[in-house]
Amino acid sequence: MSKKFIRKSVLENVRTLSAFDYLNNYHPSLLVKNGKKDYYHREHESLHFSNGKWYWWSQGVGGTTALDYLIAVEGYDFKEACNYLASLMNISAPVVTYYHKKETKPFELPEKDKNNNLVIRYLCETRKIYREIVDYFISKGMLYQSANFRNAVFVDMMVICQHMHLSEIYLKILN
């Protein structure tokens, strides 16, 4: 089945097939259910499938399409993989799984607590940060204690750290 070239229409069709749908349609015995929507590969336990994507943890590779899967996992070359998938899809059209995209909410900072006592105690006593530094960041609104879990919330710290070293901040506070 060695064709010289792969037509653009064939390639586009082959690229629409996900690795999960490929295995589910043509090699279902290789999929092992591992939770509500997660599966792993029977022969490679570190190869997982979820939400239309696959990742082979032990090898550090992943992807979405059956083409990616055949090349990375099964060792096919590109042309072989395309021809193989095209012939399978011509014999029996695959049943495709549709995934609903999760709605993402915009990021919101956690609600501030009425005081910062636990954060101050943790940073000063446990992490050994000078109280003046902690107070400085709290006064500038860049550090506070969250109301729900009493966590330390650092706001816009990357901008400060890019411009100043911590010792420079401490000297600035003392002066």
Image: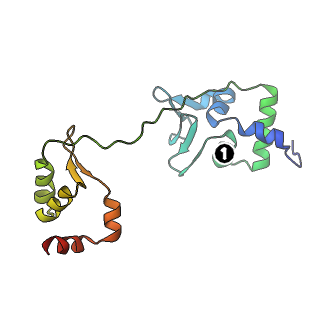
Q: Quadrant of residue 29?
A: top right
**Residue in the picture at 17% in, 42% down:** 113
Q: Please provide percent x and percent y for residue 146.
A: 21, 43
Of residue 107 and residue 89, the one placed in the foreground of this image is 107
Numbered disc 1: secondary structure: helix
Give the vertical position of 62 relative to 126 (above or below). above
Q: Answer few, some or many: residues within 10 Å of disc 1's Cα (few below 14, many 20 plus, some between 14 and 19).
A: many
Horizontal side of residue 108 vs 99, given as left or right: left
Say what amino acid the circle numbered 1 marks.
Asp
Of residue 44 and residue 151, the one placed in the foreground of this image is 151
Give the vertical position of 13 relative to 156 (above or below). above
Give the vertical position of 163 relative to 57 (above or below). below
Q: Quadrant of residue 147?
A: top left
Horizontal side of residue 109 vs 116, given as left or right: right
Q: Quadrant of the C terminus?
A: bottom left
**Residue in the picture at 61% in, 27% down:** 98
**Residue in the picture at 53% in, 52% down:** 60
What residue is disc 1 on?
68
Q: Quadrant of the N terminus?
A: top right
Instruction: Inspect this view and state whether residue 24 appears.
Output: yes
Q: Please provide percent x and percent y for residue 171.
A: 18, 75
Of residue 99 and residue 105, the one placed in the foreground of this image is 105
Q: Please provide percent x and percent y for residue 162.
A: 35, 68
Of residue 105 and residue 17, the one placed in the foreground of this image is 105
Horizontal side of residue 117 vs 145, given as left or right: left
Q: Please provide percent x and percent y for residue 58.
A: 50, 49
Instruction: Inspect this view and state whether residue 130 appears.
Output: no
**Residue in the picture at 22% in, 73% down:** 167
